[in-house]
Image (cartoon, coloured by chain):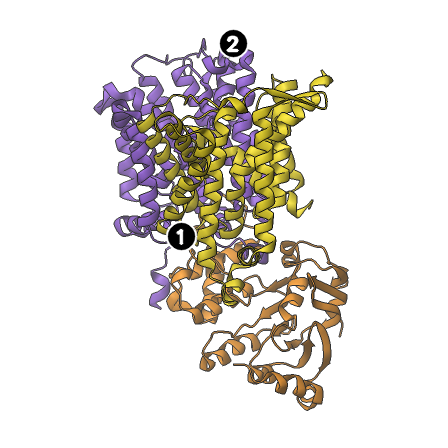
Chain colours: A orange, B yellow, C purple
Amino acid sequence: MSAVLRTEGLSRSWGALQAVKEVSFALQAGARHALIGPNGAGKTTLVNLLTGTVPPQAGNVFLDGDRITHLPQHLRVKRGMTRTFQITTLFPGLTVLESVLLAICERKGLGASWWRPVARHAAEIDEARRVVRDLQLEAEADVPTRSLPYGKQRLLEIAVALASRPRVLLLDEPAAGIPVSESAEVFGVLASLPRDVTILFIEHDMNLVFRFAERITVLVEGSILVEGTPQEIAADARVREVYLGEGSHG
Amino acid sequence: MFTSLPGVLFDGVAYGSLLFLMSIGLSVTMGLMRFINLAHGAFAMLGGYVCVVGMARLGVPFLATLPLAFLAAAAAGAVLERALYRRLYRRGPLDQVLFSLGLTLMSVAGATYVWGSGQQPMHLPGFLLGQVRVLGVDLGIYRLFLVALVATITAALVLLVRRTRFGARLRASVDDAQASAGLGIDVTRVFSVTFALGSGLAGLGGALAIDVLGLDPTFPLKYLVYFLLVVVVGGAGSIAGTLAASLLLGLFDVSGKYYVPAAGAFVIYALMVVLLLLFPGGLRRGAR
Amino acid sequence: MSGFAAVRLPDARWHPAEVAFWVALAAAPFVFPGHLVLGSQVLITGLFALSLDLILGYAGIVSLGHAAMFGAGAYTAGLLARHGWGEPLSGLAAAAVAGAAIAWATSFIAVRGGDLTRLMVTLGIGLMLYEAANQAARVTGGVDGLSDMAVRDLLGVFPFDLAGRTAYVYSFAVLFAVFLVCRRIVRSPFGLSLRGIRDGARRMPALGSPVRRRLIAIYSVSGAIAGIAGALLAQTTQFVGLEVLGFARSADLLVMLVLGGAGWLYGGLIGAALFMVAQNQLSSMNPVYWQFWLGLLLVAMVFVARGGVVGAIGLARERILGRAAR
């Protein structure tokens, strides 16, 4: 198995605060990999560095062996790496279906097509309907995003990312804000994704992490504390110390 | 030609000082509330008219009208901030532009209605007229007065911001209003006081500017671009940046008009575009 | 499966109200033969407002200097006509190129930077061009304006008459043609991506969208249309004054578009009509009154419209016209 996404000595600080300290990390193809750690550990910053939202101050990022450290975000997406955001980042004025359709059109390079109306792109509409159905947003397909309840917005957040048909999917707290009863469903959708999609997700709910992840990396204060299988992590004394000291997260 | 250079430079510094006084309020409120206030010039205009009315109708001596101009503009700022501006801080830039544009139009129309559309005549007191020879260069006394006054006020502002508790609260709020509120700082109060202070300084600047720039109801619109220019180039929220930008602008404008009169105001706008290309975040943030 | 059947996506269908609107405009020469000069001015300003709607209503760019492209088009057509090339349609094409060129050249700064920088850049470019035209008085006529234009007959057949009939039909035809193109653009996937940029600029790169390239494209198209509007003004009035580049023109345009509602193409047209008719009536009484009440209207609009001016007008509009208004 080869590392589809890899970093070497990646670092990023904000003023005096070192958010990510020389992180060298490898994500294997087809992985179901969780990134956990206490608040402020640098998890979101790491994802930002991987996706190009934020530039690193040192180190490199490699996708399929190619150095993409300074590649703009939208070009990384073109190479198959997509993400979701911890704070819902969607399009208030667009409906659910329009949002998903937008992602599909961008993926297929139709974003520059200016003559044919959206409604006449039958193939793309069909695909959008399928994605919407898969994430159980059918009933809200025609609702503008700003009118959606928060839980549904989180689902749309994922739907839009999936519509890009990523090979590498980075999820930043996908289940945040979704009622516990429904969050299992969300992860069910993620679990049903084929193995040619590699998944890295940040999550605080340990039940979900241990149910879904096959490999876990623990990030503390910007550095990797330990990495291993769920059993190894659960048994690791240092991890327990970090979490016991912090208390439990909701 | 170059024998007049020191004179031209001094004029530029004087003009820049005036711009600084009028723009500093805008810079700080833009850095603090992130509010695009196109009506800032109206407060300067108010100060100007208070000065003129004070001198012509009430016989108040020029120097005494200055604090009056400051207070009138500061009061107007405080009232408007409380009543109107405060409700719009969360709105998008379009709403802010429309609102402040509307206020500007109302103030221009109001000034025209009350005082007519002509230039307001103003006569400086005798002791501020004329020139004085300093190190072989003839400098206008009024401009010397301007530079000295603005330098004093700038020093006072820096002291206010660096040494007082209010200044600390202001700096914290500019850095991060949300975090500051979380720390117990009454951010609303900081906003109001800052807005009033900034408007007051603009009013003072407006009164001082009558002799240099003239005063008519179109003042807010005429000089709007200069104020915005100074703020954008200097970096909103930065005293040092605003000062640097004002002086730079003043020097270029005066030198441009003196040495290349055919180009007129073109030089300034071209300079602005160039500076924005090189420093998209303002001089304070440095080059990208 | 009720959800999907009711979904509406942007398509090319015409709402009956739209058809009625255009028929009414086309019928104006027969119904109001005496007001055609004002009529063409309204159409031309409407076209100008349409160009701003593309960037403001659909891409979210607030511009205080759109007159730069308008004026560039006006002077291009005017200068061509003055110096021997009076053919209107080719003058129109040249103006479109001029407007697009200026927009394209300035788009690089305009699409970077935050809201304030953008505002400043658009404002600054407008002022720069105004000053440049002012200084180049030998070429542009400066404050006195450009006149002595010999505009040839439209299509070689229709002279520009004093009653303004040819001017009206000409302006209407150009407006309608451009409108059809804009309508297609905003209802296409490209239009959808513009709305995406307006609503969620942070998410767009995460969709693989080259945001800057899209903005530069729509900004240039908008510039071309503004240039065309300027050329129409020059050709129909046979005069170009400095104010075509002025801040007042840019500011008025912004107000017009917001009045009618940005983001649905008709807003610019309706706003232009309302604004110009009102200005015509009120300004003749006392220009100060017009200015004051306009300012008050702007302030009131901002406060009464919760969630923003565009949002409130949009909500009202949706209730009246239904979903087709999107």
Amino acid beneath label 1: Arg
Nearest-to-viewer mark from 1 and 2: 1
Quadrant for residue A54, please give it.
Answer: bottom right
User: In which chain is the residue bearing label 1?
Assistant: B
Q: Position of residue A181 (x, y in %)?
A: 45, 82
User: In which chain is the residue bearing label 2?
Assistant: C
Q: Position of residue A32 (x, y in %)?
A: 64, 77
Q: Dot 1 surroundings within 10 Å: few (below 14), some, or many (20 or more)?
A: some
Q: Is residue A147 above or below residue C269?
A: below
Answer yes or no: is residue B220 visible: yes
Residue at the spot x=60%, y=28% of the render? B144
| Secondary structure of the residue carrying numbered label 1 | helix
Q: Dot 2 surroundings within 10 Å: few (below 14), some, or many (20 or more)?
A: few
Q: Is residue C289 above or below residue C311?
A: above
Tell me the quadrant of the picture where the N terminus of chain C can be found: bottom left
Q: Position of residue B156 (x, y in %)?
A: 58, 46
Q: Label 1: which residue?
A: B86
**In-front residue for pair C218/B138:** B138
Residue lying furthest left: C31
Residue at the spot x=75%, y=65% of the render? A10
**In-front residue for pair C58/C293:** C293
Spatial distance from mark 1 to mark 2, Cα to Cα? 57 Å
Q: Which mark is residue C84?
A: 2
Answer yes or no: is residue C107 visible: no
Q: Position of residue B92 (x, y in %)?
A: 44, 50
| Secondary structure of the residue carrying numbered label 2 | loop
Q: Are marks 1 and 2 on the same chain?
A: no
Left or right: residue C234 compared with residue A193: left
Q: What is the count of numbered marks?
A: 2
Left or right: residue C239 compared with residue C118: left
Amino acid beneath label 2: Gly
